[in-house]
Amino acid sequence: MKHFKNYINGDWVEGDLGILSVNNPATGEVLGTVPKVSSAKVRAAVDDAELAFRSWSKETAETRSNYLRRLYDLMLENEEDLGRTITLEQGKPLKEAIGEVRYGASFVLWYSEEAKRISGEMIPSSHKNKRIMVLKQPVGVVAAITPWNFPFAMITRKIAPALAAGCTVIVKPASQTPISAIKIMELVEKAGFPQGVVNLVTGEASSIGKAFLDHKKVKKITFTGSTEVGKELYRGAADTVKRISLELGGHAPFIVFDDAKFPDCIQGALASKFRNCGQACISSNRFYVQRGFHTEFIQGLKAQLKHFHQGNGLTPDIDLGPLIDQNAYDKVSDHVADALSKGAVLEYQGEVPDKKPEGSGGYFYPPTILSGIRRHMKIYREETFGPVIPIIEFEGEEELLTMANDSDYGLAAYVYTQDLSRAIRISEGLEYGIIGLNDGAPSTAQAPFGGFKESGIEREGGHFGIEPFLETKYISIGL
Ligand code: NAP
């Protein structure tokens, strides 16, 4: 068991409020400890980041690009070690964890290139003796708060565009998965970023969050996590009118028309549902299957799920790991029990491997299929965050769109059909920020990722993802 430190202003530092331990969700074993820092330490880290901002923001775009490129290369060189760390503290199978490292690193590569493409505009004036110049400038110190479900990629999606734009950052990772974040800082140090440009603090979330919100030198909060905490930060940001980006919860509909290509729709359903054991914001949470195709769809899923292996993510050929903790396990169990008590049908449930006594790790919830899902069941409205496929039958397009849009969330939706006109009608009608059209895995560094409604504000990825870290300045020039 190792003790890890925080990374502030180019130094590895201890906390001043004790330590937090990090557990392996597959075994319950304690993997290591990290510091708990006080608000005073967080404030000092912000001051350091602000000092670093003064010079980092003045570096050429090419220089910033080169640092990011070095970081990208180091990430790929260390993908095995990074992947192992993710599996140990988060639980996902090793091959998925290495996939997360490659996915996360692809944002560093993309923004190393995008750093060079930040440009302003000259706009024709209506006065002969005036010129209108528009500049893009970095917003300043950014506080990045990230969740446990993608402990590597949710950090790179934020720090890469922020650094490319010329901002400095302080990361506060989830308390369940801080070691992956610390490994990123080790690579930041190796890549030679100047001191204070990238920092990391760990500890009690609400006090660190408040220290960020209260500090005037924090110009932007970028947050990925639950809608509940996102709303709290949104309210808190108002006092100093901080810029804020929110990537929040989701409740994705997965829509299968009776002309869907088979088995592509089955593969898409499995990809969108079982990645990370269903613990993704874009996981499908309601499966709408057109009447007439219902039995075939369920049979197709069952045939595949029979070959799924669940267990410790470090074991070779594992498809499904554990849930993150006891609360997650209880929530999934409660959603299934609630649906069954209200008339749902249990179509399939896998075997639970090696479940340990409550609270001691090994939070393995088996793949489950339920049919006969109705609106008054919890699973229909709340984010389940587990490997459960709840199925609802539908008849026509109009009814389908009303049901699919009946959610406070609006992050991702999936549609499977071979009819082009219908595909376009439904994609346009869905109130979601990301549509997987005959695609169960739409997320990529080049594209905008983010939600409508209570799923968030702003986008990450592509050229869209750098805008939230830039201010627009207008210079009116009199000749
Ligand atoms: P969470 O409880 O909201 O935690 C997310 C982060 O916020 C953690 O670092 C947490 O710290 C911190 N936090 C908690 N309370 C805080 C407060 N009062 N002030 C400041 N920070 C605070 O969410 P989670 O359970 O870790 O993550 C799962 C959620 O994230 C799901 O809803 C999922 O859909 C969403 N998510 C969204 C996206 C997206 O791109 N839209 C991507 C991934 C996940 P501690 O760990 O120390 O409590």
Image (spheres, rainbow, N blue to C red):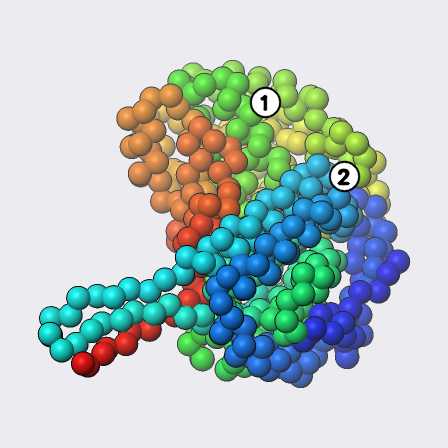
Which residue shows up at 67% across the image and 61% down it? 191
Amino acid carrying label 1: it is Leu
What is the number of the mark on residue 313?
2
Is 290 drawn above or below residue 13 in the view shown? above
Q: Which of marks 2 and 1 is nearer the N terminus?
A: 1
Compared across the picture, whether 416 is left or right of 188 comes to: left
State whether residue 317 appears in this view.
yes
For the residue carrying disc 1, how many other residues have a C-alpha within 10 Å: few (<14), some (14-19), or many (20+)? many
Q: Where is residue 290 in the image (x, y as percent from the top left)?
A: 41, 23
Where residue 401 appears, as percent x and y from the top left, is: 34, 36
- Marks 2 and 1, Cα distance to the nearest angstrom? 22 Å
Assign a secondary structure to mark 1. helix
Q: Badge 2, how many Cα within 10 Å: few under 14, some, many 20+?
A: many
Ligand 1 shows up in the quarter that is bottom right
Return the residue at label 1.
301
Query: Residue 394 is drawn in which quadrant?
Result: top left
Q: What element carries label 2?
A: loop
